[in-house]
Image (cartoon, grey):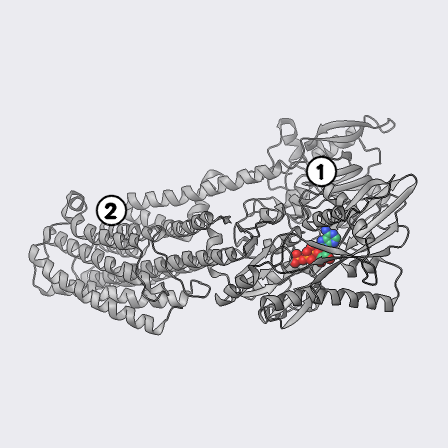
């Protein structure tokens, strides 16, 4: 829908002109206020009736508000997208060097750099195309047609007509039935047995019941939880409804959320949302926290670390690139100035500047980093672990806190029913019978399998318990709600209604009218005692059903039937996996929806020290900082709802931890999304798997540890690349700058510098090839800029010292460097010396990140280093060398060259030993 004065959507011909002056489709009914109005005031506000609009009204509104379409805005043109891609600092640097190289007639350099720029831009545009097609898939969630009540004139009876959904306008009245996609944001006028699937909006795959009260509930519920509203992007699962259109097109929440990210939703399209992220110091209620998984819309093409911006590896690489650019901006002009002052101002200054800048740039950096991470992903794939993208591999390497859901993750996903208990803890069959009746109904409707319901049903069948009473059939299923911690079924027939509710004991007891304070205390003590002895209790209650279907509360009070006891033992591999994680310096934190007693007992069994057990309800009083400190200090979190789990994860991330969350259920989706790395167990439900960055292959928890190890190895390889590339390139540039000032000619031509860099980078692609693994330190691997910079300075300087020794040897040997042939031979000498010293540095510096007892470089790295040395000696002597301005080096010159290389080897060995001494790995 076009935005005021800013844009117009590609509307079909005739409507395009009319739509130019359109206003946002929610303007007539600002959802924030309108959604809270009663049915009749709302109809009046929208100038509509339960019989819908007249054709004339609809036409006027269509012209005014535009079509009900969430087509993406006409994205920026190809030129603009290309320019945006060029704005990436690394690509911009290469592009600038291409332009300058062209200006100084260094055609070969310009062509190669130009090709590198085209490759970088092409990769970026291809990624954007993939995202656009993901968006198209999301838009397919909207229906093509809708059943609308319209009248030719006000006095006529309405006709229910199937119209293209694009023609819906605010004020229209639509009809819906099971299986229909919701075409716009709607307010229910009438609903029968209605449940909707909002999984595309909230990630929660369980259908939610909706009804049509005349007045909305007074408490302001979270937006997607308003019981009387339906949203575009959801689907009706069961029942029928008549509803009033509140907002269409981009004014719907679905439309607003799927705008291109660079274009924020206009004020009018923003629905009431929770306030912005709470400050780290302010206590925050869950509903006032950052938009939760339940509230946020899915967006196309999720990446690892997307919620926090770039991943840890991306951040490290960007910082390195920024530092390179800053160094270039300061050092190159300063040296050119010095050169100009010493040797006079001539046109050769520019090629000199270009050569120095090219020398500093690791041209294949993006290729090497993504190849190394992709290799890590493939490695995990071979172990049966599915990784969403290379970013995830990097995050795994940096991960230092792993939050674990309890049930189905640390304990078996297959619940083991021990039996039924009456309210006094004595064996009884009724609780299991009624729990199974509710479970059976829930399973018949559920999209995702619920292991607890499966187990209840199986146990009742095994015990030979009867099903529901004869004559009563399922009228409505109230799916298990992890926030309320209850679920149930409404049975009806022969003038009777019966509501069965099952859930967490506290939640069910809170809805039972019967027990007094003492009795409640006794029941709570019973539940806690069972939890301590390793049994989780599920409460079961019954009531005479509600008078009207769709109303969630029964007429009569709920009466406690008893409990179902479930055993709660850890899976075999859990203790070992937790110990291995602790050994790898990963802090393990348990976040569960279960009883605090069960959580504490399990932690004891796993050897996890428990400093305190915090309940989900207590989190609102804590600031994010306190929360993160508690989690890091060994707190266990129990009775957490999905949003509370996500809040703990977010608080830890704000405290600069790299956080993983391992879960298996729908209730884990918000936390999976909030984490740097969401990890789903092998038996996780579809929604959890869909949102996870990593899916474990087997039931064995140790696979999580293996994933971390593979991530650390990949990040260690990236770190090795950055260390070596930064130090060698820095060394080359310093040599180029100093040599340029000291020598009366360019120490190396720009194209030769570029060729040398490409050879070196190509050799470093060997880091992405298999071979012996690099053993990273036994702790999370990050890319600390301080250490990288210190490394680059130390080893860059060593490299430079050997270059300058060569320059000095040539300068003071008295050789005549006046002619082109002599200068070509000098270029050959430096090129050869450079590649040989880099070939020496490659395996030695690579091993500096290896924590193994006797680190040895992998075979591919050894071969690449040998190849690099051979190229360094032979390339300048061949036809390509001649074409690039090299000239043969007199044989006698190879002696001093060998001495310089030997000197560098000694320096390198000393530097490596000292570095290890001051920076022990492990
Ligand atoms: N299908 C269900 N029907 C009824 N009650 C349930 C159901 N599933 C869970 N419960 C109850 O609700 C409580 C909270 O459930 P939730 O799924 O949030 O956490 P959990 O499964 O106990 O633990 P975790 O968060 O570690 O997976 C459970 O402890 C249990 O008492």
Q: Residue at x 57, y 40 (%)?
A: 135
Find numbered disc 2 in the image and state the secondary structure of the residue it sits on: loop
Q: Nearer the viewer, residue 126 or 670?
A: 670
Q: Residue at x 44, y 63 (%)?
A: 781
Position of 851 relative to 413 (above/below): below
Q: Residue at x 90, y 50 (%)?
A: 555
* Residue 106 tag number: 2
Locate residue 155, reporting x and y percent.
88, 28
Q: Quadrant of residue 107?
A: top left
Q: Are marks 1 and 2 in contact (CB under 8 Å)?
A: no
Q: Nearer the viewer, residue 224 or 648?
A: 648
Q: Is residue 47 visible?
A: yes
Locate residue 428, reporting x and y percent.
82, 56
Locate residue 115, reporting x and y percent.
33, 43
Locate residue 619, reporting x and y percent.
68, 66
Question: Going by the image, does 543 lie left or right of 913?
Answer: right
Q: Tell which quarter ligand 1 is in.
A: bottom right
CB at disc 2 and ligand 1 closer than 8 Å: no
Q: Nearer the viewer, residue 580 or 41?
A: 580
The total of numbered circles placed on residues is 2
Label whose residue precedes the other's in the sequence (1 or 2)? 2
| Crowd rating for badge 1 (residues with CA inside 10 Å; few <14, some 14–19, many 20+) | many
Quarter that holds the C terminus: bottom left
Find numbered disc 1 in the image and state the secondary structure of the residue it sits on: loop
Calculate the distance from the C-alpha at mark 1 to the C-alpha at mark 2. Answer: 61 Å
Q: Which residue is mark 1?
A: 182
Position of 521 relative to 56 (above/below): below
Q: Nearer the viewer, mark 1 or mark 2?
A: 1
């Amino acid at each position: 829908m076009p935005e005021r004065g800013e844009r117009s959507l590609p509307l079909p011909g005739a409507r395009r002109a009319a739509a130019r002056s359109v206003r946002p489709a929610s303007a007539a009914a600002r959802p924030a206020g309108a959604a809270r109005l009663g049915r009749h005031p709302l109809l009046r506000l929208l100038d509509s009736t339960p019989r819908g609009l007249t054709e004339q009204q609809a036409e006027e509104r269509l012209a005014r508000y535009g079509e009900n379409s969430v087509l993406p805005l006409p994205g920026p043109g190809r030129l603009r997208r290309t320019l945006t891609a060029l704005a990436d600092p690394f690509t911009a640097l290469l592009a600038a060097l291409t332009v300058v190289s062209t200006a100084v007639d260094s055609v070969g350099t310009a062509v190669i750099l130009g090709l590198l720029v085209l490759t970088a831009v092409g990769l970026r545009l291809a990624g954007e195309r993939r995202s656009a097609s993901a968006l198209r898939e999301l838009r397919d969630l909207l229906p093509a047609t809708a059943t609308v009540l319209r009248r030719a004139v006000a006095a006529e009876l309405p006709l229910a007509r199937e119209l293209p959904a694009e023609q819906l306008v605010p004020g229209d009245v639509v009809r819906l039935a099971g299986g229909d996609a919701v075409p716009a944001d709607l307010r229910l006028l009438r609903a029968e047995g209605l449940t909707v699937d909002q999984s595309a909006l909230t990630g929660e795959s369980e259908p939610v019941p909706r009804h049509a009260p005349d007045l909305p509930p007074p408490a302001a519920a979270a937006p997607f939880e308003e019981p009387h509203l339906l949203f575009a992007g959801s689907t009706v699962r069961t029942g029928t409804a008549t509803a009033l259109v509140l907002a269409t097109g981009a004014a719907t929440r679905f439309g607003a959320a799927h705008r291109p990210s660079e274009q924020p939703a206009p004020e009018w399209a923003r629905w009431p949302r929770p306030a912005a992220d709470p400050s780290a110091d302010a206590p925050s209620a869950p509903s006032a926290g950052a938009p939760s998984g339940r509230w946020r819309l899915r967006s196309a093409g999720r990446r690892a670390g997307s919620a926090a911006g770039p991943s840890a590896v991306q951040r490290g690489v960007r910082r390195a690139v920024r530092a390179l650019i800053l160094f270039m901006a300061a050092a190159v002009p300063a040296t050119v100035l010095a050169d100009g002052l010493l040797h006079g101002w001539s046109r050769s200054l520019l090629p000199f500047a270009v050569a120095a800048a090219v020398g500093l740039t690791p041209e294949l950096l993006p290729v090497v980093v993504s190849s190394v991470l992709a290799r890590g992903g493939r490695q995990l794939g071979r172990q049966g672990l599915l990784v969403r993208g290379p970013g995830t591999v990097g995050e795994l390497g940096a991960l230092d806190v792993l939050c674990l859901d309890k049930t189905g993750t640390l304990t078996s996903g297959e619940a083991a029913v021990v039996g039924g208990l009456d309210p006094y803890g004595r064996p009884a069959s009724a609780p299991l019978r009624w729990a199974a009746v509710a479970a059976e109904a829930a399973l018949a409707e559920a999209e995702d399998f619920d292991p607890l319901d499966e187990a209840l049903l199986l146990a009742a069948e095994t015990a030979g318990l009867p099903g529901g009473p004869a004559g009563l059939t399922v009228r409505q299923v109230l799916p298990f709600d992890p926030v309320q911690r209850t679920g149930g079924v409404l049975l009806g027939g022969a003038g009777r209604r019966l509501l069965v509710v099952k859930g967490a004991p506290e939640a069910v007891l809170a809805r039972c009218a019967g027990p007094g304070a003492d009795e409640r205390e006794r029941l709570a003590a019973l539940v806690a005692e069972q939890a301590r002895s390793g049994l989780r209790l599920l409460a079961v209650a019954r009531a005479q059903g509600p008078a009207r279907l769709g109303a969630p509360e029964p007429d009569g009070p709920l009466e406690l039937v008893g409990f179902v006891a479930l055993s709660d033992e850890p899976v075999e591999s859990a203790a070992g996996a937790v110990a291995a994680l602790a050994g790898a310096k990963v802090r393990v934190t348990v976040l569960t929806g279960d009883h605090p007693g069960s959580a504490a007992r399990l932690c004891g069994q796993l050897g996890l020290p428990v400093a305190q057990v915090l309940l989900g309800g207590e989190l609102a009083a804590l600031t994010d900082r306190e929360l993160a400190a508690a989690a890091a200090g060994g707190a266990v979190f129990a009775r957490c709802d999905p949003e509370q789990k996500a809040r703990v994860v977010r608080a830890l991330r704000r405290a600069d931890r790299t956080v993983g969350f391992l879960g298996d259920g729908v209730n884990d989706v918000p936390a999976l999304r909030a984490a740097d790395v969401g990890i789903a167990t092998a038996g996780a439900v579809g929604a959890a798997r869909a949102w996870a960055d990593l899916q474990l292959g087997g039931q064995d928890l140790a696979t999580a540890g293996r994933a971390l190890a593979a991530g650390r190895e990949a990040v260690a390889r990236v770190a090795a690349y950055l260390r070596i590339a930064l130090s060698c390139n820095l060394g080359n540039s310093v040599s180029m700058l100093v040599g340029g000032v000291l020598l009366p000619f360019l120490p190396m031509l720009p194209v030769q510098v570029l060729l040398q860099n490409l050879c070196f980078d190509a050799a470093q692609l060997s880091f992405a090839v298999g071979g012996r693994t690099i053993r990273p330190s036994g702790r999370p691997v990050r890319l600390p800029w301080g250490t990288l910079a210190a490394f680059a300075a130390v080893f860059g300087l060593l490299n430079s010292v050997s270059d300058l020794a060569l320059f000095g040897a040539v300068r003071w040997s008295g050789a005549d460097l006046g002619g082109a042939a002599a200068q070509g031979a000098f270029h050959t000498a430096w090129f050869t010396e450079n590649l040989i010293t880099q070939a020496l540095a490659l395996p030695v510096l690579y091993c500096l990140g290896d924590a193994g007892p006797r680190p040895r470089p992998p075979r591919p790295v050894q071969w690449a280093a040998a190849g690099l040395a051979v190229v360094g000696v032979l390339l300048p002597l061949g036809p390509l060398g001649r074409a690039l301005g090299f000239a043969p080096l007199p044989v006698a010159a190879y002696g001093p060259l060998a001495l310089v290389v030997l000197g560098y080897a000694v320096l390198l060995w000393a530097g490596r030993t000292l570095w290890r001494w001051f920076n022990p790995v492990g």
